[in-house]
């Protein structure tokens, strides 16, 4: 099965900067930001008051009234993104047995649980009829987005969830690619969906000192790779892809965005808080594993870079270890200043950006990086630095808990 090549034929996006690939890409290339003051609940008492919310999403545009009632926001995002990806791939139906559904998610249940806690003074403390949503447990299952997408696509074969913090989406896509290469399926519906902008996640990450607390204009607060960067900010959304075995796509006349040329993931060995190795050594091993022998062909990197001083530095160290002297000449982009850190959705926004970069020949600018940190040794993408002739794009992710993931995308050719 070594000659089976996974390719991406459909992209569906629900993001803070636009719904659908065109709106997302136009916003990203023009330097728009999805960050603003949190509007979904009163965040005035929280140290962090900003996030990149999906504000113009109308679930009834994509789902029936019953589906809207019984699906969480994360599952709604995933279902809507799936429908956009299916239409983009020009697929009206899927082989129920030879199609996989593999979705990454990390926080999809927290918002549902938080909602139950705020429903009444006694909810989850004692039982009173009407306090708790009868569908609350089903909505909060981490498996819920994958199950909902499987239902809509009528897939009855391999359906699974990948949960590895911020690397969840990338690792879900990598697993789907591996299954196609192994001949276990011909098509995979894969991606990620997360909705971490809620009381519980904001409280926990604020208590851990992981979120931006500056009292400045929200759109300029998250500054990846900038010398004045501080901490990250939350985002939300979903990206779902339709992935096919290359010959399967060719046989139906489909045009792909890219081939998947490499995938690697692992955990850190460090003893640091949240298992981040400052040297980036383990992260570098993952990047090197994904790149393989194609290191000289990589001409654009879409970095994890959430705008956190220590995480950005560790990733830069990993990139220097892999690319050596070439590091300072390879454009490195971070889109987190626009989309935020949305756990599985964050890595999926990176993947979407990488795929659209390959198909359009453009590189998104790194928003808010006004004074690149020279100590990082990177060539950070700028608004004036958007042309590329590269055929390979590397996508990198790191998750709380020490999980690293990386995917290498190659320009599609028949």
Image (cartoon, rainbow, N blue to C red):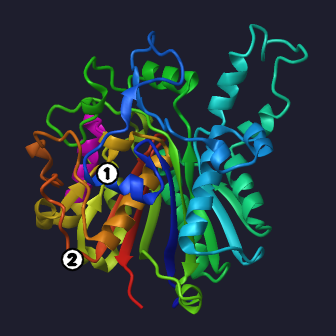
Q: Secondary structure at mark 2?
A: helix
Q: Residue at x 18, y 54 (%)?
A: 381
Residue nearest the observer in this picture, 320 or 199 = 199
Residue nearest the observer in this picture, 221 or 319 = 221
Q: Is residue 335 left or right of residue 266?
A: left
Residue nearest the observer in this picture, 337 or 344 = 337
Q: Residues within 10 Å of mark 1 (few under 14, many from 20)?
A: many
Q: Which labelled disc corresponds to residue 28?
A: 1
Q: Quadrant of residue 213?
A: top left
Pick the quarter of the image with the C terminus: bottom left
Q: Is residue 134 left or right of residue 265?
A: right
Q: Is residue 314 magenta?
A: yes
Q: Quadrant of residue 212?
A: top left
Q: Which residue is mark 2?
A: 296
Above or below residue 194? Residue 325 is below
Q: Which residues are magenta?
A: 307-320
Q: Residue at x 74, y 54 (%)?
A: 147
Q: Residues within 10 Å of mark 2 (few under 14, many from 20)?
A: few
Task: Quote the CA–CA distance across marks 1 and 2.
Answer: 27 Å
């Amino acid at each position: 099965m070594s000659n089976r090549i996974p390719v991406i034929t459909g992209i569906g996006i629900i993001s803070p900067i636009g719904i659908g690939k065109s709106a997302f890409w136009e916003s990203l290339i023009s330097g728009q930001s999805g960050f603003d003051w949190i509007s979904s609940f009163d965040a005035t008492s929280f140290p962090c008051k900003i996030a990149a919310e999906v504000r113009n999403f109308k679930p009834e545009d994509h789902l029936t009234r019953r589906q809207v009632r019984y699906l969480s926001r994360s599952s709604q995002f995933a279902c809507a993104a799936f429908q956009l990806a299916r239409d983009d791939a020009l697929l009206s139906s899927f082989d129920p047995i030879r199609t996989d559904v593999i979705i990454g998610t990390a926080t999809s249940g927290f918002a549902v649980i938080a909602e139950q806690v705020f429903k009444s003074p006694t909810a989850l403390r004692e039982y009173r009829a009407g306090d708790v949503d009868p569908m609350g447990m089903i909505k909060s299952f981490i498996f819920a987005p994958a199950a909902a997408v499987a239902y809509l696509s009528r897939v009855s074969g391999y359906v699974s969830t990948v949960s590895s913090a911020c690397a969840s989406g990338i690792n879900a896509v990598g697993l789907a690619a591996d299954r196609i290469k192994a001949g276990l399926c011909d098509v995979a519906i894969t991606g990620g969906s997360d909705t971490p902008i809620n009381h519980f996640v904001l409280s926990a990450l604020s208590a851990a000192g992981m979120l931006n607390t500056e009292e400045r204009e929200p759109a300029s607060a998250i500054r990846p790779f900038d010398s004045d960067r501080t901490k990250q900010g939350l985002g939300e959304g979903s990206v779902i892809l339709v992935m096919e075995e290359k010959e399967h796509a060719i046989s139906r006349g489909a045009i792909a965005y890219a081939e998947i040329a490499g995938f690697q993931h692992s955990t850190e060995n460090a003893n640091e808080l949240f298992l981040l190795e400052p040297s980036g050594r383990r992260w570098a091993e993952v990047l090197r594993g994904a790149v393989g022998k194609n290191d000289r062909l990589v001409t654009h990197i879409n970095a994890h870079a959430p705008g956190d001083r220590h995480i950005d530095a560790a990733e830069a160290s990993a990139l220097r270890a892999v690319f050596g002297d070439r590091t300072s000449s390879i454009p490195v982009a971070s889109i987190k200043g626009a989309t935020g850190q949305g756990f599985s959705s964050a890595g999926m926004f990176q993947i979407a950006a990488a795929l659209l970069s390959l198909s359009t020949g453009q590189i998104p600018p790194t928003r808010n990086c006004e004074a690149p940190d020279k100590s990082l040794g990177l060539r950070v993408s700028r608004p004036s630095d958007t042309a590329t002739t590269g055929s390979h794009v590397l996508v990198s992710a790191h998750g709380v808990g020490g999980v690293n993931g990386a995917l290498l995308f190659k320009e599609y050719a028949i």
